[in-house]
């Protein structure tokens, strides 16, 4: 039986920004795979439109400076994109996951093209130089995971 969990996105200061429900599909000592249904009417990032009802397979890892959302068209197996947040490692508390978003994002299209989003917002946030370096290392690791021409096996992350 799957367990329902609340996901809370916070800003870099730890203030809650957004929350929603998902279900834990798989968990290991490395992290969680959460399944959630996109609830907003429509969000456009670059040339990808996320629609209400799209299926999100979300990877949250205890020791990584990112999380990964595999976005599928509706509830089909067709992948629309991967949306990756650069963030502090997630925190798991009994029935919720919290993460501090650090503004910088990586959007990966099914054909392998990568787009780094929100660079200016990342430059503007107040975080330490150490955290900024760890965040950029997280971005670099993500870019390697999604190397052009190879379909990522995200199950290896867990």
Image (cartoon, rainbow, N blue to C red):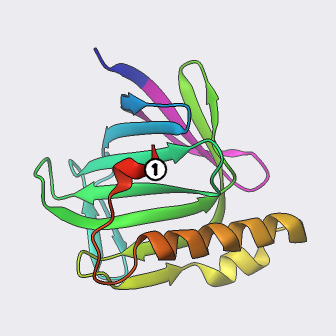
Residue 2 percent coordinates (x, y): 31, 20
Q: Is residue 114 visible?
A: yes
Q: Is 3 part of what is drawn in magenta?
A: no
Which element carries disc 1, helix, strand or loop? helix
The answer to whether residue 127 shows anywhere in this view is no
* Secondary structure, magenta segment, majority class: strand
Question: In the image, is residue 6 part of the stretch drawn in magenta?
Answer: yes
Q: How many numbered discs, if any?
A: 1
Quarter of the image for the C terminus: give it: top left
How far across and down, in percent of the image, does residue 57 sit? 32, 47
In the shown orientation, is residue 12 left or right of residue 110? right
* x then y, percent, for residue 1: 28, 14
> Image quarter for residue 4?
top left
Give the class, few, some or many, for how many residues have Cα within 10 Å of label 1's Cα (few <14, many ≥20).
some
In the picture, measured across the screen, residue 146 lies left or right of residue 42, that is: right
Vertical placement of residue 4 versus 106, above or below: above
Identify the residue at horizontal 62%, vertical 38% (top origin): 98
Range of the magenta residues? Answer: 5-21
* Vertical position of residue 120 compared to residue 73: above or below: below
Q: Vertical placement of 111 versus 12: above or below?
A: below
Q: Residue at x 56, y 45 (%)?
A: 61
Which quadrant of the view contains residue 128? bottom right
In the rendered view, tell whether residue 132 sits above or below residue 25. Answer: below
Furthest residue in direction top, as rendered: 1
Query: Which residue is at the front of the view, 28 or 70?
Result: 28
Tell me where residue 25 appears, x and y as whole percent: 33, 31
Q: Nearer the viewer, residue 52 or 143?
A: 143
Residue lying furthest front = 156
Residue at image location 44% in from the left, 47% down from the top: 59
| Residue of label 1 | 157
């Amino acid at each position: 039986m799957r367990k329902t969990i609340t996901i809370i996105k916070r800003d870099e200061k730890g203030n809650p920004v957004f929350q929603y429900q998902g279900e834990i599909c798989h968990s290991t000592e490395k992290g969680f795979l959460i399944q959630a249904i996109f609830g907003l009417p429509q969000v456009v990032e670059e040339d990808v439109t996320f629609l209400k009802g799209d299926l999100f397979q979300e990877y949250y890892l205890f020791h990584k400076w990112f999380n990964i959302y595999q976005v599928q068209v509706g509830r089909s197996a067709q992948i629309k994109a991967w949306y990756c947040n650069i963030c502090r490692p997630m925190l798991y508390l009994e029935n919720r996951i919290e993460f501090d978003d650090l503004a910088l994002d990586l959007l990966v299209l099914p054909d392998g093209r990568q787009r780094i989003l929100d660079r200016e917002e990342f430059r503007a946030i107040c975080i330490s130089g150490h955290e900024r370096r760890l965040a950029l290392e997280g971005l670099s690791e993500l870019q390697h995971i999604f190397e052009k021409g190879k379909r990522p096996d995200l199950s290896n992350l867990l």
